[in-house]
Image (tube, rainbow, N blue to C red):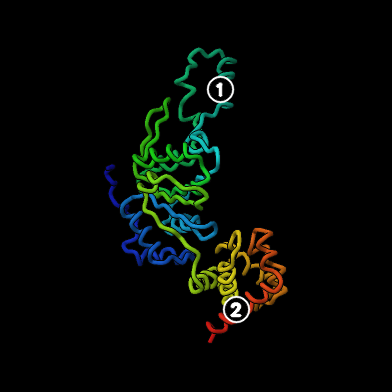
Amino acid sequence: MTRLPPARASAPASVEELQRLLADQHYIAERGLAISLYLGLKLARPIFLEGEAGVGKTEVAKVLAAGLGVELIRLQCYEGLDVSHAVYEWNYPRQILEIRTQEATGASNLSSKTLFTEEFLIKRPLLRALEAPRGSAPVLLIDEIDRADEEFEGFLLEVLSDFQVTIPELGTIRADEPPIVVITSNRTREVHDALKRRCLYFWIDYPDFEKELRIITTRAPEAPRALAEEVAAFVREIRASDLMKPSGVSETLDWIAALMALDQTELDAQVVSDTLGILLKQQEDIQAIRGERLDLLLGRARARGARQSG
């Protein structure tokens, strides 16, 4: 087993302190998530966050970087992602320009050693994260790893084992201090167990009513309380429906912002119908909710909001 590096000096002293750090960045984290993040920082292990799209996985890395006061380096994964876009590539246009300049001046000392130097290297997210000086290790967000090919996943496995990469022309580059790695997946495909075993795993689920209400009141404190309660309750009813793509927390926040922009203080059937495209992103889901079903869900949401207020 690979020997773990020492704990980070900048890591919060306790799980509670980490929760406060996240709360200061307006992120509501349940204790289970906070424990996983805390252990990831203490043990210098990558953190693997899985869950449906829009539940706040990417936001974890953003607020963690902001709370710790370190740089956030993001690698957005996609099909066909390779080493040249994730780690490094050579700046060929600049190398060609250098060759032509040297030829024009009659220079005779041009060689691969002068062309393949750091001056001509384009550093991509993984290399930038590994090169950070000790004491300023960034948060490296590897976002939506499930969108990348399995070949890249295998390469990433090697990088996370020793936190190093090899550039044939320059040699091996090893991190003085491993970055804080956060990997996210929407589970559009299964990620190999070998990668998960190198990480601390946590599943982020849709929030319950109380947590979603806390998120709304934290991120949109100017929202009327009654509206916030009805929105949290209505979204809860939406997620319990048989839909192709339930709304995530990000859609909830977009929706309450839109309702406030329309000067709404409470939900009514017309405004909900008019703004469903903010909450739901599939036309089939929007059509399934409109009409009598919308009235039913809205009635349930109002009743729940009234119970909470009472």
Crowd around label 1: few <14 · some 14–19 · many ≥20 (10 Å): some
User: Which residue is tagged 2?
Assistant: 300
Question: Which is more toward the observer, 260 or 183?
Answer: 183
- Residue 121 position within the rendered picture, expressed as x and y whole percent measured from the top left: 49, 31
Question: Which is more toward the observer, 184 or 94?
Answer: 184
Kindly identify the residue that appears in the image at 43 percent across and 43 percent down: 129
Q: Amino acid at mark 2?
A: Arg
Task: Work out which residue is located at the far bottom of the displayed protein and give it.
Answer: 310
User: Which residue is tagged 1?
Assistant: 98
Q: Is residue 136 visible?
A: no
Question: Which is more toward the observer, 203 or 176?
Answer: 203
- Quarter holding the N terminus is top left
Crowd around label 2: few <14 · some 14–19 · many ≥20 (10 Å): some
Kindly identify the residue that appears in the image at 43 percent across and 25 percent down: 169
* Picture mark count: 2
- Residue 260 position within the rendered picture, expressed as x and y whole percent measured from the top left: 65, 72
SS for tag 1?
helix
Q: Amino acid at mark 1?
A: Glu
Rendered view: 132 above or below 236:
above
Please identify, in this view, whether the residue under mark 2 or under mark 1 is nearer the observer. Answer: 2
Rendered view: 234 above or below 14:
below
Kindly identify the residue that appears in the image at 47 percent across and 50 percent down: 72
Question: Which is more toward the observer, 176 or 184?
Answer: 184
SS for tag 2?
helix
Question: Position of 91 compared to 282: left or right?
Answer: left
